[in-house]
Amino acid sequence: MMKNKNKKIYILFVLVFILLLIFANNIILMFIDTDSKYVATDLDKYDSNSKVYTAVGSLETYEDMQESLYINGWAFCETENDNPDKKITVILSNNKKSYALETSAVERRDVRSAFPDKKIPSMINGIETKGSTLGVSDGIYDIYLYVWENEDNYGIIKTGKQIIKSKDEFKEITSYETNDSLSFEYDENLKHSENISYADGLLNIDGWAFIDGLNADNQDVYVYLLYKDNNYKLFTCSESTRMDVSNLYDNDNYFYSGFSASIPVDDTDKPVGYAICIDNNGTMKCSDIINIK
């Protein structure tokens, strides 16, 4: 009798242990403050009436119990009105799901001095937040920032930063191969300048690119790699701000023209050429193919 009772207790213990493993994330989420975790949202609900200026200085992932994501940087929209209740929302989004974490802006004194010609009424232009991504489904996500200055000025911008979250990895990515088909269409209006180098099995490329006359705020930049057998691969790029390019061309539209990528390469099958391609509002345009020495 005692043996059967012990056996039942053991089976119950195992079942409870298995259930705890299955629902561990949900249990942990119950004890995380709502203001400290990413929650499901709809990207389309974030309206925009003003241009967002931003730069993400640090992006770090942590493999802790909360699977935390740390982001540090600055962001603002021009406004002529006071903004004591300014909010900056970090949004993780792909073509299936979106998640958001709203945070109050923090002080960044350097931003206003860096943009003396912009209408920036206060010093609260910084973002520094660490939030739990336990409730975020596995996938590759673009990182957006929604900046709410006040009721008159607000906007959303894709930062050009990306993360991958899966059972095997949780990290920032600067490039990944995409299966998107590419109709190679040369456009003489695509302006670009980049540096390219090999190191530690990676092809590193960074520079700037834009299509003359088009706003670069929401453009997507790709690296097209051509191989000896005339096959090609298309890789995404991480995008960034380039104030120097904006100043050089005296055009604010090119503020987000920076890009970079680190692409794994096989020493036995290195690419022989590359092109810079830009998708701006659904239209893909490319530079000439440049030989890789």
Image (spheres, rainbow, N blue to C red):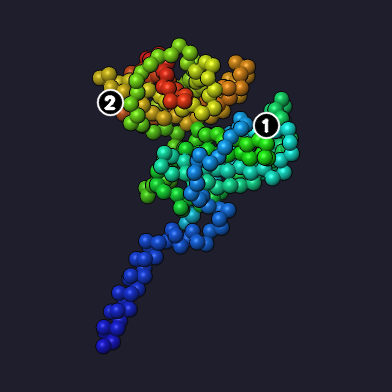
Badge number at residue 200 = none
Please name the residue shown 43% across and 58% down the image.
25
Three-letter amino acid code of the residue under disc 2: Thr
Q: Nearer the viewer, residue 257 or 175?
A: 257
Residue 205: name its quadrant: top left
Which three-letter amino acid code belongs to the residue tagged 1? Glu
Q: Position of residue 96 (x, y in %)?
A: 41, 42
Mark 2 near mark 1, Cβ–Cβ under 8 Å?
A: no
Residue visible at 61% across and 47% down? 103
Identify the image quadrant of the N terminus. Answer: bottom left
Q: Residue at x 46, y 53 (%)?
A: 134
Above-or-below relation of 124 to 113? below
Q: Earlier in the sequence, mark 2 or mark 1?
A: 1
Q: Is 207 placed left or right of 274 in the picture? A: right
Q: Could you tell me if residue 197 is visible in this image?
A: no
Quarter placement of the C terminus: top left
Q: How far apart are the two marked residues, 2 and 1, measured between alpha carbons?
A: 51 Å
Q: Position of residue 100 (x, y in %)?
A: 52, 46
Q: Is residue 288 visible?
A: yes
Q: Give the residue at mark 2.
A: 268
Numbered circles on residues, count: 2
Q: Secondary structure at mark 1?
A: loop
Residue at 61% across, 18% down? 251
SS of the residue under disc 2: loop
**Is residue 14 shown above or below 72?**
below
The crowd level at tag 2 (other Cα within 10 Å; few <14, some 14-19, many 20+) is few
Give how far across and how far down residue 235 sits, in percent: 38, 28
Q: Is residue 49 left or right of residue 282?
A: right
Residue bearing mark 1: 78
The image position of residue 286, as x and y in percent, is: 41, 18
